[in-house]
Image (cartoon, helix red, strand yellow):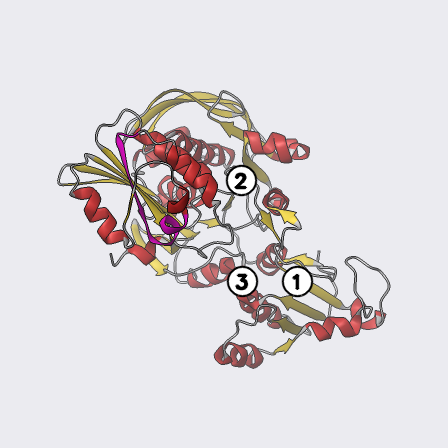
Amino acid sequence: MLRKSFKDVLVVDMTHGGKIIAIEFSKLPSCNVFGWDIYNTLTDGDKDNLQENGVKLVDENYLKRLYNPNPQPNVSSRSNLNELDILSVVAPIHCNLDYPVDMSHHEAVAFLLMNRIEIPVIEVTGVKGKTSVVHMLKEIFKDLNPLILSSLGVEVVDDGEIKLLKRDISITPASIIDAWRMSQDYDVGIFIIETSLGGTGLADVGILTNIIEDYTIAKGTRKASQAKIQIFNNKLVACDYDSFNLFYPDFKDKTNTFSIDGKGNVKASNIIFGFHETVFQVEVKDLKTISSEIYNDSFEISTFAPALHHVQNVLSTICASLTLGISKNTIITGLKNFNGLKGRTSITNRNDIRIIEEVNPGINLATIKKSISMLEDLPRSSVVFGGKYGVTCEEINEESAASILNELTENIQLILTDELGNSVKDTMKRDFHYIPYLDEAMDYAFNSGCQNILLIYRSNFHDLQHR
């Protein structure tokens, strides 16, 4: 944690929000701020902006001068103790530095905003489901004029009207500062945040949706589960039951859990699936609320949740809302109004053909399996599979993806497309069509006599809006 009395701050990584964090630190009195563009992505305009705000750009030689000639992580001997004693190093959780770090970007954002946000905050992290959960929460808290930060952009609900403040924004912790700044002209009653790789600690309730794939970060030196432990810096946490038991049992006193298999504080039973509306019973047992009460109840939910992983997302939303003290009737009404999320899972019809879209920058093996499960018992179906590389830090195992697709029954037509489709086609053992461009692949599926088309596509949704 950053020293309470400090003079110099070095912010590492200008690519993933460091510019915003460095400029915020420069606004503090008597604070000298240095920025290290470790990935060399700053434009000349970025450099000018930082320097105009008093941020001095340095490189690794700045730290080498302060540390031993051959630095080792967490080594206590220093070549210049006086300067190091007043220097605080701020770096993202995924950055693998050869120097001790005093504060993550998440912690820095909490430090910079801790006395500026006086409304309830919910913070959502996890491997899958984050964006969908944030937008379910938006429906539940719509009457409070929520401020929303998600991978789809920054929105504010202003007396029932949804206003998009910014479309293209990352979910690195620094974007929380950006979103909060944009909201100052609105009467916001709650701040709902999607955050990558953990939480800041600003929230009344944090949500960890799941860790269905514990992928590596920081050049393979750490796992996602180690980064996401930061979500427990928040006051209370709603956490997937399996993830909690596997990685975080030490946080029992501040955690409520949820699951679809009869375990945890919030669970589902009697699930009746539908493509546009799924109905199930919610059982709540011994849930801790933010007001230190213990809550028990049972009620019915009807919402968009066409597969098990969608029900899991709904449960995380319910768990967090109850933890914050929201009434079950408000939750029931809000989820009834949730109809899926364009850019994640959505279901539409075109000329009596059902189109199920799973468009997501974080498409992974678990998503592929769960999406394909929606085609069970459906006649005349096609799967269109493909997408782009480089849209997230988490890449996909092509051989494993091909193995899942090879298990499709022969009565399901398979169409591969784009970069990802091209990568898996040589390992396919079943019949398929490869069509390079997504538009043409979808047209082929429409014209082949299908009644149901499942599109599994790895991309940012706004990249597809012109198709």
Q: Which mark is residue 213?
A: 2
Q: Nearer the viewer, residue 32 or 131?
A: 131
State the residue in front, 324 or 368: 368
Confirm whether residue 63 shows in the render.
Answer: yes
Q: For the residues carrying marks 2 and 1, which lies nearer the camera in this image?
A: 2
Q: Which of marks 1 and 2 precedes in the sequence?
A: 1
213 left or right, relative to 306: right
The residue stretch that appears in magenta: 410-423
| Residue 206 position in % (x across, y down) | 54, 42
Task: Indicate the secondary structure of the residue bearing disc 2.
Answer: loop
- Decide: is 343 above or below 6: above
x 84%, y 67%: residue = 78
Residue 311 percent location from the top left of the image: 40, 30
Distance in Å between CA atoms under marks 2 and 3? 22 Å
Q: Mark on residue 90?
A: 1
Using the image as rendered, state which of residue 38 and residue 325 is in the foreground: 38
Quadrant (top left/top right/bottom left/bottom right) for the N terminus: bottom right
Q: Which residue is disc 3 drawn over? A: 16
Residue 147 magenta-drawn? no
